[in-house]
Amino acid sequence: MALLRLANITKKYKLENGKERVVLDNISLSFSNNGFVSIIGKSGSGKSTLLNMISLLDEPTNGCVYFNGKKINKFNLKEKEDYRNKNIGIIFQHYYLLEDESVIFNIMLPLLIKGINVNEAAIKSKNLLKTIDFNEKLYNSKCKDLSGGEKERVAILRSLVNNPQIILADEPTGALDSINSILIMELLKQISKDRLVIVVSHNEQLVDKYSDRKITIKDGKIDSDSEYKKDIKIIEKMHEEKHNKKSYWIRSLSKSNFISRIKRNIIGMTSLFVGLVSSLLIVGFSNGSPSSIKKSTYQQIDYGVATISKETSQQIPGSKMSLVQMTRPSEAELINSQNALEHFYLEPNITTLISKYPTIKSGDSRLEELSYNPIYSFIDNSLNKDLLIKGKIPEEETLSEVLINKKGYEYIKKEFKSEPIGLTLSIHNEYEYHSYGNTNQVITDYFIYDKEITIVGMVDDLNFLSTPKLYYSYQVIKEYLQETLLVNMSAKKGEEITWYDMIINCDNSEDLSSYSYLLFLKDHKNTPYLKDYIDLVQPPLKIESPSLTISDALFSLINAATLGMELFLVIALVGTTLILGIISFSSYTEDKKTSAILTCLGASKKEIFSIYFYENLFICLISLISSLIFAPLLALLANFIIKSITGFINMISIPLLAVLIIIPSTIIICSLATYLPLFFSKKISPKEELSEE
Ligand code: ADP
Ligand code: MG
């Protein structure tokens, strides 16, 4: 039985003008399993097309190809790849070696593709090189450094190494001088002893001497076919080597591709690195900022100070505007909000008498930016003593000692170039109060607050957005007001009336009431988030807390910023995937010839794609690892800078989950960037890529 049989093969090409061109015209040929068969014909007569029919690089329009009696021209892609790898060795006129790889690597490539392990493949390749006395010094040289004759011999050995039953050589000596051509013919003759060697040539003279059979083609038809000069030798089929698919060659090619395209790959790595690091930081920011703001809000000494008032609004008839009026709620109205208020001390608001902005002086100079603020007490649980940075907290309730915040400390230090702790200031505030006696007579009382105060300690606070502040104890002021009389009114009425009584008993909509009550959180340690209480209070009652107003504003700001950043993140990741995709697309397009060669050696499309996948995977892993190292370091640095500017601690906190998610995401980016462009790129046709010009 013939090893190979072509039965009525016709090959037609459709031309662009719509006409057909018959390149092979009903050709039938049988080949036995050894011998040197030459195919002679003029250029364009259809010789290469005929070889492509045998190697299944091209399909006949009509007719069948049989191998060992089996019809093979309708094989699927995988079967074709397998058939080529196991049974066919192809030698091209232009050698088509992987020029950047070594001699040894090129020869062992078909073995590696087959799944033979690298050591065994190397031994086999060396043995082959020895049989033709190939210069041992050149074994590890890159093919691009070899002479034409040397390259051709390497190409022949590569076609042989898998021990295929058929060797197809298309114009193997076309580019060689006559001495080298003879050497090559000798070599092909030698290997044709135990396999079928089909040599295409237009040089009849050269091949004549070596041919066991000579076929001439003219215009796609067989013009002549000489008989075999010698008997057909039956060769036993080699036993199959064990296949253990190892992707050594794929990784090895990926690696050399990676190195040869290092500049491009650095761009890819950098863009992915930037993408991954910014993703981690952005996720870290949206994860860390809310709790950081919450914590920072909590870390203020007047965190628990708020006011509660009643807000009523009245539509102005005929207008879209409404009149909003604030009053101090009545006790009955407060009872409804008892569940929220039980965590607070509810006190009359004294800020009409003790203004937040009294005249504060050091000697003769006025400290205009400094404000004067109540906290409940210096000694009880409402105070977070951990916030003290410098100096001390007054050990008893006293009017003559105050605390200062960081901003205030810096302000005084800058204005007076002296140490604020221990500094004595004078405070002055006046208030004029009119009341009416029985006979519509106006009684005027003056509240004059004149004190010497000493700054004894500095407390930490949100430096960012805070203003210079002094803190005094509400307890002492309260006592002070309870002891200070309205002199004129008391005299008129004949009883002792204190300023404190006046505030308590005044009308809720009167100036003196400050239109509100002061709230002081009772216990800073065991009190959860202030906002929860505020939400419990039903309109028209309304709690106002300066620290929460600031944090609310910050939350809105951060939310807007995070949204923007997340948008940026998506763009960054899509952009990165695109950049990587473009890189692998251009690499793949650039390497079309190499892919075609690998296809001819039996490599599957999947394996060829894997070369690019590994290259990208390598890029991705390097970027991933470096971003996993750098992102936390950058976060640390950013946190340090944010803290020193704004006082917020740990604004960026990268969650473990993000790290866990980013690993598979990177692999997905890598796969998308590899397979999508390859999927959409033009299919490589080895026949066209490698057709002899
Ligand atoms: P040879 O190897 O004998 O020089 P080929 O087998 O390469 O010739 O080509 C035979 C003929 O088929 C040539 O005239 C060539 O132009 C034509 N041919 C080959 N491939 C195509 C194609 N894809 N489309 C149209 N014509 C083709
Ligand atoms: Mg040709």
Image: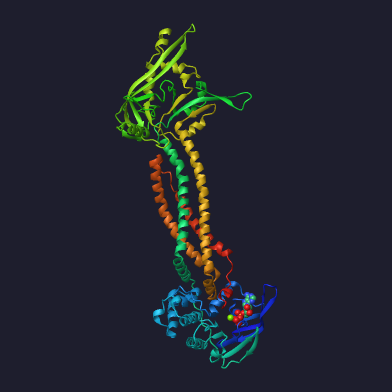
Q: Which of 486 and 464 is in front in this view?
A: 464
Q: Can the viewer see residue 104 in this picture?
A: no
Q: Position of residue 149 (x, y in %)?
A: 47, 83
Which image quadrant is residue 25 in? bottom right
Q: How is the image coloured?
A: rainbow
Q: Where is residue 546 in the image (x, y as percent from the top left)?
A: 45, 31
Q: Nearer the viewer, residue 318 or 34?
A: 318
How many numbered marks have been drawn onto this rendered protein structure? 0
Q: Can the viewer see residue 256 in this picture?
A: yes
Please identify the residue farthest to the top as the structure is shown: 439
Q: Where is residue 416 in the image (x, y as percent from the top left)?
A: 32, 31
* Image quadrant containing the N terminus: bottom right
Q: Is residue 357 above or below residue 497?
A: below
* Image quadrant containing the C terminus: bottom right
Query: Left or right: where does residue 502 sit relative to residue 237?
Result: left
Q: In this view, does 3 lie above or below 673?
A: below
Ligand 2, seen in the image, is in the quarter at: bottom right
Please identify the residue farthest to the right as the structure is shown: 19
Q: Nearer the viewer, residue 642 or 319?
A: 319
Q: Where is residue 471 in the image (x, y as percent from the top left)?
A: 37, 28
Query: Left or right: where does residue 474 sit relative to residue 223?
Result: left
Q: Nearer the viewer, residue 470 or 693?
A: 693
Query: Left or right: where does residue 424 sit relative to residue 327?
Result: left
Q: Residue at x 61, y 85 (%)?
A: 42
